[in-house]
Image (cartoon, grey):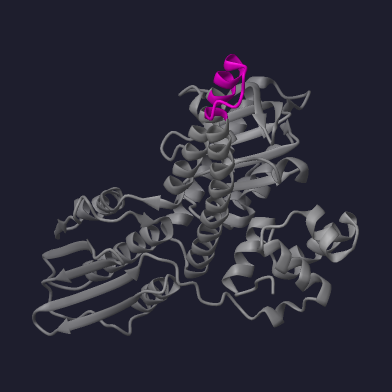
Amino acid sequence: MLEAAAELAEAPLNRIADSLRNAILPFFRNSALIIFTEDCTGRPQKKSGEEDILSRVSITELDRLRSVLPDNGPWHNRAVIAGEPRNVLALRHPSSHALLVLTDPSIIAEDSEAEATAILRYFWRLTATRIQEKVSDAPPSYLLESRAASAERVRVTAELIDQHSTTLETLLAALRSGSLDDAEARTSVTDMAVKALIELRTLNDRTSDLVEEPVMTAFERLREDLRPLMHFSNIDFQFIEPPKSGRALPGEVAHAARAVVRGLALAIAEQPDVSRVRTQWDCDGENLLINVRDDGRGELSADAASISRLQHRVQAVDGRMSIDVMPGWGADISVVIPLDSGIKGGGDAAAWGLAARELEVLQLLSSGQRNRIIATTMHISENTVKFHIKNLYQKLNVRSRAEAIALAHATGIRRP
C-alpha cells in the first residue's frame, strides 16, 4: 500500500488513472476505472481498463451519475455507462466535485467490505488531491495539450449540434405541416423531438461550461489561492476585480493566469521592504490583461529562474509578459494572454517515425473518423486499423484517441 501511495503521489496526470486502478485492484476488481474532473479542461476524463467501455463512456453519462450521488459514502447501484446499464461503484470528492466510477466492481474475498471501502476512499482522496495540485501548478506542456484538446472537443461538439439540430428542426417542421392524419401520433413525435432538441442544447451548454470559466470565478479562485500567503506575510494584497460582464476564460487560460500570479506573488514576497502588492485583471474581449505591481525597492530580477519559468507558462498559451523594474519604486509586471486558441506546432511529426499507413490513420483520426470508416477508406480490415492505432499510441506516447487527436491538431496534422 505504501508503494502504491508513493506511485500515486508521483504519477503524471496522463497516468494517474492507471496508477489508481493498480492501487485498488488488490481490493476491488473492476472492468474499468473512470475519473471525471472539471479541473482538467482539456481532458476531463481519465480512464483505465477495458477499451470497449473507455472508448464509449460520455461526459453526459458521468454528469448525470454525479447528479444523483449522495453527499456521503460510496454509491453502489446500476447506471448507464458506455451506453449500457452496468453495476457501478461511484464516489465524489467533496472539494473538487471530481467523480470516480468503477464498473462491475467486486470486493476481493479475503477483504471485508468496510476495509476495502476505507482503502478505496483513501486512495481516491489522494488521487483527487494530486489532480488538484498538478492542475494548479500546470506546466507549459500541459497547458498546450489542454488548449488543443479543449479546442478539439468544442469543434466536434459544434459539428454534432449543427447536424442533429438541423435534422430535428426539419422533423419538427414536417410534423407541424399537417401532412400527417394521425394527430395523436404527430403530437407524440413532436414532443419527443422537442425533448431531444432541449437535451442536445443542454449538452452544448454543458460542454461550453467544461472548457470555460467565468472571469469573476477565476479571479475569486486566485484570491483563495493567495489567502495563505496573505495570512502569513506582512504584505497587503490588493485585488482589483475584473468587470463582471467580462468574457469567460478558456480553462487553460484561467489555470495559467492563476499560476503566473501566484508565482509572481511568491517571487515578490521574497524581496525586501515590500509592504503592498496590487493585482488587477481586465479583459478587452480578446485578451486577459493581468497587472501585478509592488512597492518594494525594485530588485525583482527578470533573469531569475522563477521568473523564467513563469515566462514559459505564459508562452505556452501564446501570451507575453513584460517586467518594468523601477529602482526604489518597485516592479510593474504586465501579462497578456489571448483568449482564443492560437496553437503552435506541438512538435515535429517527423520525429515520431510514423510509417505512411500510420500517418494516414492519424490523419483520419484527427478528422474524427471511427475505426470502421478508417478501414473502409483505407481498404483494410478493422483489426489492421486497431494494430496501426496501437503503434500510434506507442510512437506518440499517448494513451487514448483524444490524446492522439489533440496532439495531431497541435502539430498541424490534418486529412489532405
Q: Is residue 363 above or below residue 50?
A: below
Q: Quadrant of residue 229?
A: bottom left
Q: Where residue 263 sits: x, y (%)?
A: 32, 66
For residue 237, side relative to residue 106 (left or right)? left
Q: Quadrant of residue 113?
A: top right
For residue 35, side relative to residue 370 (left or right)? left
Residue range corresponding to the magenta coloring: 175-190
Q: Where residue 70 sits: x, y (%)?
A: 49, 22
Q: Where residue 68 sits: x, y (%)?
A: 51, 23
Q: Is residue 117 above or below residue 128?
A: above
Q: Quadrant of residue 329?
A: bottom left
Q: Residue at x 42, y 70 (%)?
A: 317
Reply yes or no: does residue 386 show up in magenta: no
Give the quarter of the figure containing the C terminus. bottom right
140 or 156: which is nearer to us?
A: 156
Q: Is residue 200 visible?
A: yes
324 or 317: which is nearer to us?
A: 317
Give the quarter of the figure containing the N terminus. top right
For residue 156, side relative to residue 198 (left or right)? right
Q: Where residue 26 sits: x, y (%)?
A: 74, 36
Label the magenta part by its dominant secondary structure: helix
Q: Residue at x 8, y 82 (%)?
A: 328
